[in-house]
Image: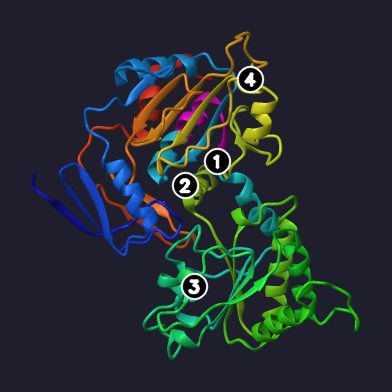
Amino acid sequence: MATASLTDIACPFCGLACDDLSLNESSGTLTASGGACSRAQSVFQKIGSVRSDAASSWIDGKPVTLEQAMTKAIELIASAQAPLFGGLATDVLGMRGLMELADRTGAILDHMNSESKLRNLRTVQDAGWITTTLSEVRNRADVIVCFGTDVSSRFPRFFERCVWVEKPMFLEDSEHRQVILIGEPKNLASAISPKGQQPEVIAIAQDRLAEAAALMRGLVAGSLPNKIKTDLPFEALQSVAERLQAAHYGVIVWAAADLDWSHAELTIQALTAMIGTLNNTTRCAGMPLGGSDGDFSSDAVMLWQSGYPFRTSLASGTSQYDPVMHSTERIVAEGETDCVLWVAGLDPDRIQVPNLRAVTSRHSASAKGCPMIALTSAGADLVSEAAVQITVATPGVDTHGYLFRADKVVTLPLRKAIQRSYPTVAEIAQHILVGLGDKAC
């Protein structure tokens, strides 16, 4: 079989959206090389290895034709009084299609990553912040503090792409950078420079990170009492504060998904307040990493079309944002939906569906639980909760698309790499719209 090769491919499987990959298709296998990390290699291979004659549509777990699955999906949405569109792991084009369908059906929209994203959003809403871009980190930062995350576990090539670069534009070289990891880092290998410079690790348990952030804020502001009692590594944190004060361009990096405890937004507020204080005398910025599972892309489409982020309802004909009432977890637990359209169209290992089997919607007399329509990428497992499951084209693999990068500054084009006949999320949404006719609200 002939081999097809593509270069300069952007990867859709984490927020870095690295755009220097090469893809080779041969004998039904899709191999990612070039700069591809282990995650990219695994996911590209998993999606690409699915045979074209394999089942791609199911009703109650049994293979059916795409036409049969679509007919059932239209029937479920047409009869729904309170639909929930969740997951939303798709690209810009897919989300635009979902927004049109949600507007027509009065759905609530919530992303699978919204809980962690809201930790950042609440901080911006309450006090604002100063953040930077991946390019600024790459070319200017001389002190980089990764707080509560090792970064690499979620963004495998962060240090390679943004820290240990060969020729930063405004630094003599990257080897003079100071990299400090605060927390319980699990993956240190990529944080080591090419010449062997080790990152400094300040070990602090996750349940003490909020206290550590507040302590660092006080150290930078000079607002601590003369004597303070703490069993945290005070001198090490004091040293970090002093180095940030002396830095030409300091950066505090965090991933909100790793700050997983109640009211973690207060920890982020402490970090951003510290950044604000540092900018009185030097330059410092935050780097809140995200963008995986299409969360920044879907959120951007919601913002420019509705004026609000995730957890917005279109049921009244206008956008109503409520980060508490419109959460997937609460809606499902309270039985306030009678049909869930769940979209997990990127990484086949990231489906994250809510358990609907035991839920009987207060909007329906059905005792079978709330029906789900699951749109998943090739290689995904069968979803036991799904009344209908349809395999959709993955942007950047078997369809083109657009994805917002982690810093939300650049939208990268995703190129179609292989020829397959899976429908896109946008095509599914449009087909349902046409099938609804005048039944939609």
Query: What residue is rendered at 65% in x and 86% in y?
Result: 243
Using a 10 Å C-alpha cutoff, classify the residue at mark 4 as few (fewer than 14 neighbours), some (14 to 19) or many (20 or more).
many
Q: Earlier in the sequence, mark 2 or mark 1?
A: 1
Give the magenta-colored segment's residue range: 99-110
Estimate the spatial distance between the alpha carbons at disc 4 and disc 1, rounded to whole Å. Answer: 20 Å
Could you say where residue 125 lies in the image, as x and y percent from the top left? 69, 56
Q: Amino acid at mark 4?
A: Val
Q: Amino acid at mark 1?
A: His
Q: SS of the residue at dot 2?
A: helix
Residue 359: numbered disc: 4
Q: Earlier in the sequence, mark 1 or mark 3?
A: 1
What residue is disc 3 on?
191
Estimate the spatial distance between the alpha carbons at disc 4 and disc 3, rounded to whole Å. Answer: 45 Å
Q: Earlier in the sequence, mark 4 or mark 1?
A: 1
Q: SS of the residue at dot 1?
A: strand
Q: Nearer the viewer, mark 4 or mark 1?
A: 4
Estimate the spatial distance between the alpha carbons at disc 2 and disc 3, rounded to whole Å. Answer: 24 Å
Using a 10 Å C-alpha cutoff, classify the residue at mark 1 as few (fewer than 14 neighbours), some (14 to 19) or many (20 or more).
many
What residue is disc 1 on?
111
Find out whether the residues at labels 2 and 3 contact each other: C-beta distance under 8 Å: no
Q: SS of the residue at dot 4?
A: loop
Query: What residue is rendered at 68% in x and 63% in y?
Result: 128
Estimate the spatial distance between the alpha carbons at disc 1 and disc 3, rounded to whole Å. Answer: 30 Å
Could you say where residue 59 lies in the image, as x and y percent from the top left? 40, 17
